[in-house]
Image (cartoon, grey):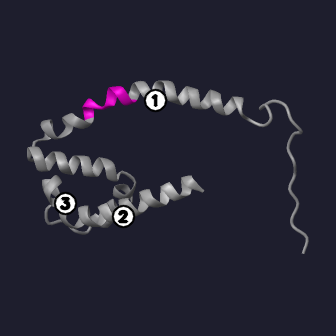
């Protein structure tokens, strides 16, 4: 229940960011997008899911101006620490999931054929 609530909040925030960004911020972040309005609805799903990155990029461009080298440096600077965390977190999650599994993968009762419900 909590995960669904967090996902719903994430999507609502993403929708709000998408509306503001697509309407106002896209022209400021990407100068090649100025005057092109037909492709903007295609960006909505991506902006909804990646809204923290969109806001980060938008704030960076507002602070430093449109310079591709300086614009991408903050995002690239965070790649190594995230890579280190994921290198340990993904195997730990996998091993933890295998340890708390109800029945081991190779043992158990076997496949159970489901029947149609009686009417």
Residue that numbered label 1 is attached to: 86
In the image, residue 15 sits, relative to residue 94, either above or below, namely: below
Residue that numbered label 3 is attached to: 25
- What is the crowding at mark 2: few (fewer than 14 residues within 10 Å), some, or many (at least 20)? some
Q: Residue at x 85, y 44 (%)?
A: 111
The label shown at residue 17 is none
Q: Is residue 39 visible?
A: no
Residue that numbered label 2 is attached to: 15
Q: Residue at x 56, y 54 (%)?
A: 2
- Region rendered in magenta: 76-82
Please report whichever mark, 2 or 1, sits nearer to the chain's N-terminal start: 2
Q: Is residue 25 visible?
A: yes
How much space separates mark 3 and mark 2, taking CA atoms? 14 Å
Say which element carries label 2: helix
Furthest residue toward bottom:
119
Say which element carries label 1: helix
Main secondary structure type of the part rendered in magenta? helix
Q: Is residue 42 left or right of residue 25?
A: right
């Amino acid at each position: 229940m909590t995960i669904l609530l967090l996902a719903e909040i994430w999507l609502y925030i993403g929708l709000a960011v998408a509306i503001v960004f697509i309407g106002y911020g896209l022209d400021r972040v990407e100068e090649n997008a100025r005057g092109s309005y037909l492709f903007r609805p295609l960006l909505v799903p991506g902006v909804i899911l990646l809204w923290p990155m969109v806001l980060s990029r938008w704030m960076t461009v507002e602070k430093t101006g449109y310079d591709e080298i300086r614009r991408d440096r903050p995002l690239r600077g965070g790649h190594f620490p995230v890579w280190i965390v994921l290198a340990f977190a993904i195997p730990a999650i996998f091993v933890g999931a295998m340890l708390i599994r109800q029945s081991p993968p190779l043992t158990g009762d076997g496949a159970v054929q489901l029947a149609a419900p009686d009417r």
